[in-house]
Image: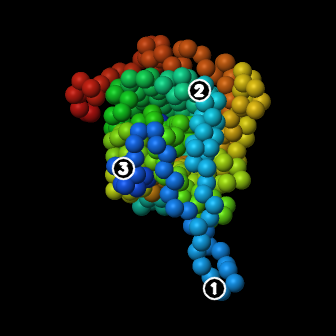
């Protein structure tokens, strides 16, 4: 199996996870359920006597969380198509690879479908429901289907914490919890940090949000010690085409996403075309494992929940 193929499949699936935020341990232990905490906010300002840091007006934490969750509520169903570019460096020099991708989800991300193709040839088809994920590798010899519990890391992934929810988090498509720490380190941006349910090594998330747009622009997935596992940069926001929603409720989403793993093996750039909720991209068969299995016909199946090792 080629080096390019070994890189493409794991990273596409690792996009399937989301959770970002680094909540201070004091917040995690001292707060009551549902309580919102605002961290001290400092902005450098000049006064008549000397340069000094003064406390800036407190941000409305409840309003910030409400704004984020209102946007995510408009993403209960979502579908988009675009291109993904991978650049990496190894002992043989610099490399570049490109693929076409189709991403869709329903039920707020409980059901997910992600397909990758190159020159009309399918490289991978990954997906998930509320209980498990799957990954078809048609180019492997022999072709293979992987199965695993939704919160179980994907084998051989460049992002060892990865799973479906990491994708949603890195795309800023998961609602924020009530317990969030907000810090404003500059007049133009603020940072939100919070804890997520553990999924492999990923347990915390940090998000940077420009004040003028209110749309996340940078997301970090962190381990229990605050180390960065992966990050995404979200830019060029556009309004998703959601004809079933009033104009005021149609969410803004990034049309350009840059993904990086802590290993620095490669950097992905993804460009979405016409993100929205087109019915032809949300057909039932795209999310039905048995239907997909009949189409892909893998030669072997590895079910991680049955303790079958990778051969």
- Label 1 or label 2, whichever lies nearer to me, is 1
The residue wearing badge 3 is 30
The residue wearing badge 1 is 50
Label tally: 3
Viewer-nearest residue: 260 or 101: 260
Residue at 41% over, 39% down: 33
**Picture layout, residue 285 above or below residue 267:** above
Horizontal side of 38 relative to 203 (left or right) equals right
Viewer-nearest residue: 286 or 298: 286
The x, y position of residue 246, in whole percent, is 76, 26
Residue at 64% over, 36% down: 71
Q: Find numbered disc 3 in the image and state the secondary structure of the residue it sits on.
A: helix
Dot label at residue 76? 2
Q: Earlier in the sequence, mark 1 or mark 2?
A: 1
Q: Find numbered disc 2 in the image and state the secondary structure of the residue it sits on.
A: loop
What is the spatial separation of the Cα atoms under label 3 and label 1, in whole angstroms? 36 Å
What is the spatial separation of the Cα atoms under label 2 and label 3, in whole angstroms? 32 Å
- Label 2 or label 3, whichever lies nearer to me, is 3
Q: Determine crowd level at label 3: few under 14, some 14-19, many 20+ residues with C-alpha closer than 10 A.
A: few
Q: Find numbered disc 1 in the image and state the secondary structure of the residue it sits on.
A: loop
Q: Earlier in the sequence, mark 3 or mark 1?
A: 3
């Amino acid at each position: 199996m080629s080096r390019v193929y070994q890189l493409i499949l794991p990273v596409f699936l690792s996009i399937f996870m989301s959770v970002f935020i680094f909540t201070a341990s004091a917040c995690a232990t001292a707060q009551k359920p549902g309580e919102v905490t605002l961290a001290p906010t400092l902005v450098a300002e000049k006064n008549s006597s000397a340069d000094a840091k003064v406390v800036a007006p407190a941000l409305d934490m409840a309003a910030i969380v409400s704004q984020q969750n209102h946007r995510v509520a408009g993403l209960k169903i979502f579908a988009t198509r675009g291109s993904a570019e991978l650049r990496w460096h190894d002992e043989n020099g610099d490399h570049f690879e490109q693929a076409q991708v189709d991403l869709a989800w329903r039920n707020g991300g409980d059901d997910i479908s992600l397909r990758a193709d190159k020159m009309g040839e399918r490289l991978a088809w990954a997906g998930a429901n509320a209980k498990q994920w799957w990954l078809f590798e048609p180019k492997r010899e022999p072709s293979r289907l992987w199965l695993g519990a939704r919160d179980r890391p994907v084998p051989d992934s460049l992002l060892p914490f990865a799973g479906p929810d990491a994708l949603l988090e890195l795309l800023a498509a998961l609602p924020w919890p009530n317990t969030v720490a907000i810090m404003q380190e500059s007049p133009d941006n603020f940072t939100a940090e919070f804890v997520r349910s553990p999924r492999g090594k990923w347990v915390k998330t940090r998000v940077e949000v420009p004040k003028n747009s209110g749309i996340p622009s940078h997301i970090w997935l962190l381990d229990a010690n605050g180390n960065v596992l992966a990050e995404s940069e979200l830019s060029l926001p556009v309004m998703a085409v959601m004809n079933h929603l009033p104009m005021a409720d149609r969410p803004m989403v990034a049309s350009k996403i840059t993904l990086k793993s802590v290993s620095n093996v490669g950097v992905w750039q993804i460009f979405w075309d016409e993100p929205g909720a087109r019915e032809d991209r949300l057909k039932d068969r795209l999310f039905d494992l048995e239907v997909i299995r009949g189409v892909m016909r893998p030669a072997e199946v590895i079910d991680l929940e049955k303790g079958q090792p990778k051969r």
